[in-house]
Image (cartoon, rainbow, N blue to C red):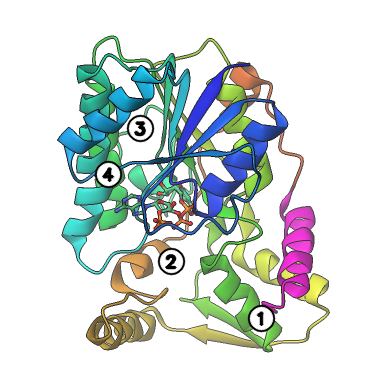
Amino acid sequence: MGNILITGASGFIGSFLAEEALKRDLDVFAGLRKSSSRRYLQDSRIRFVELDFTDKTRLKETLLEQKQKGIHFDTIIHNAGLTKARKKEDFYRVNYRFTKNFIEALTETGTVPLKFIYISSLAAYGPGNELSMKPVMLDDIPKPVDEYGKSKLESEKYIRSLNGFPWLIIRPSGVYGPREKDYFVYFQTISRGMEPYIGFKPQILTFIYVKDLVRLILDAAFSGITGKSYFVTDGKQYDSREFAAITKKHLQKKTLRITLPLKLVGGIALAMEKIFSLAGSMPTLNTDKFKIMKSTNWTCQVDVLEKDFNFQAEYDLDRGVKEVLEWYKNEGWL
Ligand SMILES: NC(=O)c1ccc[n+]([C@@H]2O[C@H](COP(=O)([O-])OP(=O)(O)OC[C@H]3O[C@@H](n4cnc5c(N)ncnc54)[C@H](OP(=O)(O)O)[C@@H]3O)[C@@H](O)[C@H]2O)c1
């Protein structure tokens, strides 16, 4: 079946991509850094490649070393990315400049794959109109609201400007599943008996379960399609109260509903960010994430997924949340 290089393989989505690729009998190369955890990359068939995106010369040396060993990556999934950052420049450095370094290194070493999939995000396009509540369409003008989304869009623009480079862009909405740490905070809050809402207007959310997402990405990798971009959700839309109701049902919890005014949450996000910055870290609730959390329309166009990849999600939110909560409980997270 050929081989595949997955960058950011140590992370949540990356580790599931590696598992899905192994299921499909691909030779799997996990691209990571020296400091990356290998906790979820224990399968002995996985080979590791240390990629230093900070330095194009070193990146080229690594790619040439692989080439000398007779290894040519047929497919590359560039999934490494920063979703939280201490400084806004970090988003651009990692999500944009590292992507550019990587693609230039591939081009300059003659190691361009047959397909290069860039894992972007719905955040690159931003939320949909909050009055009409129309979904974000593929041909809409992107309007990212946070620095993370803007940095993802920057890489997309660069990738789309390339001539003869075999790219495909995947923009997942909210990805949840085992090993994930941000939605986990929400599940944990519900499990502690609190049901928080931000602002008084219900949010319309979209999700994709990680196992469905990686299946779609691998199907896209081996399709004949290049030069296109896709939003990815499970095809449904969920009111924020439905998300809570599903979570409560599977946790068998009664909760106290707490609706926090937008201004208060914005203030808390700012305060937490300042406190955490003293320790050199970034809280899950920060000012950038707040812009995402307060948006009420996260619907997007996904009809093309079925047409181009025959994709149907196997997990809706009810099934996915049930499974992920079982995982968190079994692992002692909940
Ligand atoms: N989770 C979501 O809801 C969601 C939604 C849409 C798009 N995405 C995109 O999906 C991709 C994976 O996200 P995730 O949720 O799996 O995040 P994650 O668990 O934080 O994993 C991020 C991966 O990127 C690597 N990475 C981060 N900074 C790096 C750097 N400076 N140099 C090299 N590698 C670096 C990490 O390596 P280390 O382990 O060494 O830190 C890790 O392997 C990202 O591109 C993200 O933007 C995620």
Label 4 crowd (10 A; few <14 / some 14-19 / many >=20) = some
Q: Is residue 91 above or below residue 7?
A: below
Q: Is residue 320 magenta?
A: yes
Residue 140's tag is: 3
Distance from Cα at disc 1 to Cα at disc 4: 39 Å
Mark found first going from the N terminus, 3 or 4:
4
Q: Quadrant of the C terminus?
A: bottom right
Q: Secondary structure at mark 1?
A: helix
**Which of the two marks, 3 or 1, is nearer to us in this view?**
1
CA gap, disc 3 to disc 2? 21 Å
Query: What type is the residue that disc 1 sits on?
Result: Ile
Identify residue for label 1. 190
Position of residue 90 measured from the top left corner of the image (x, y, whole percent) = 21, 58
Ligand 1 closer than 8 Å to the CB at disc 3? no
Picture residue at 40% right of the left edge, 17% below the top: 113
N-terminal-most mark, 3 or 2: 3
Q: Is residue 112 above or below residue 103?
A: above
Of helix, strand and loop, which one carries label 4?
loop
Q: Which residue is mark 2?
A: 293
Viewer-side label of 1, 4: 4
Q: Residue at x 67, y 88 (%)?
A: 192
Q: Residue furthest front?
A: 69
> Which range is magenta?
316-334
Mark 3 surroundings: few (<14), some (14-19) or many (≥20) residues within 10 A = few
Q: Which residue is mark 4?
A: 52
- Name the residue type under label 2: Met
